[in-house]
Image: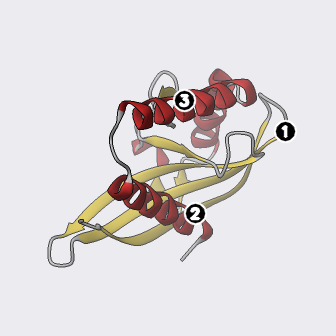
Amino acid sequence: MTKASAILMLFFCSAILSSAFMVDTPETRAAVETQNAEWRSDILRNYDLPALHEFLSSIIEKRPIVDNIDLRKAPIAPKWRLIENSLTCGGWTFNSASPVSSEFEMVWTIDDVPDPKNGGGVWKLMTLHCRRDGKAKFFLIDKKYSVEEYITLVP
């Protein structure tokens, strides 16, 4: 299991487990909204989203084929969208351990193949591991295609 898939799995498991034990009250909804607002604020303070968009586009333009995967097939929206505590740009998702971290990933889920027998499935992913040096200066560290299994936890 790669570091990216471990972080992704930990995120999803944490979200599922925390939602299973969280009582939905006005206070908990307010706390979640406060956390989401802080995350959005940190992202906007630490990342220039138009520059991040240009960086993603330039990676695909410079090297459109990685591990026999055509990155041009991944939809790219006109700009990055902040929704709750996530950042997306078409088919790409921004991942980072922290919105103030200098390392981050942009992930395209090429395919999601569900397996109804075990309640999970397989994700086919292209991950661009990157680093930022300031708000608008980004560097590509590595590109990687991976196939990750997942399970769906049902309470």
Instruction: Tell me: 72 left or right of 100.
Output: left
Give the position of the C terminus as an image quadrant: bottom left
Instruction: Tell me: 108 left or right of 112.
Output: right
Which colour style is shown?
secondary structure
Name the N-terminal-most of marks 2 and 1.
2
Identify residue type, mark 3: Thr
Name the N-terminal-most of marks 1 and 3.
3
Identify residue type, mark 1: Asp
Q: Quadrant of residue 74?
A: top left
Looking at the image, residue 70 lies above or below residue 35: below
Disc 2/disc 1 C-alpha distance (Å): 21 Å
- Secondary structure state at the residue bearing disc 1: loop
Q: Position of residue 1 (x, y in %)?
A: 53, 77
- Secondary structure state at the residue bearing disc 3: helix
Identify residue type, mark 2: Ala
- Secondary structure state at the residue bearing disc 2: helix
Badge 2 is on which residue?
4
Question: Residue sitting at 46 percent across and 49 percent down?
Answer: 108
Instruction: Tell me: 25 left or right of 51.
Output: left
Name the N-terminal-most of marks 3 and 2.
2
Badge 1 is on which residue?
133
Q: Position of residue 69 (x, y in %)?
A: 45, 58
Question: Residue sitting at 61 percent across and 68 percent down?
Answer: 3
User: Which is in the foreground here, disc 1 or disc 3?
Assistant: 3
Question: Residue sitting at 26 percent across and 70 percent down?
Answer: 120
Question: Residue sitting at 38 percent across and 50 percent down?
Answer: 22
Q: Nearer the viewer, residue 129 or 61?
A: 129
Q: Residues within 10 Å of mark 3 (few under 14, many from 20)?
A: few
User: Which is in the foreground here, disc 3 or disc 2?
Assistant: 3
Which disc is residue 118 wearing?
none
Badge 3 is on which residue?
34
Q: Position of residue 114 (x, y in %)?
A: 22, 66
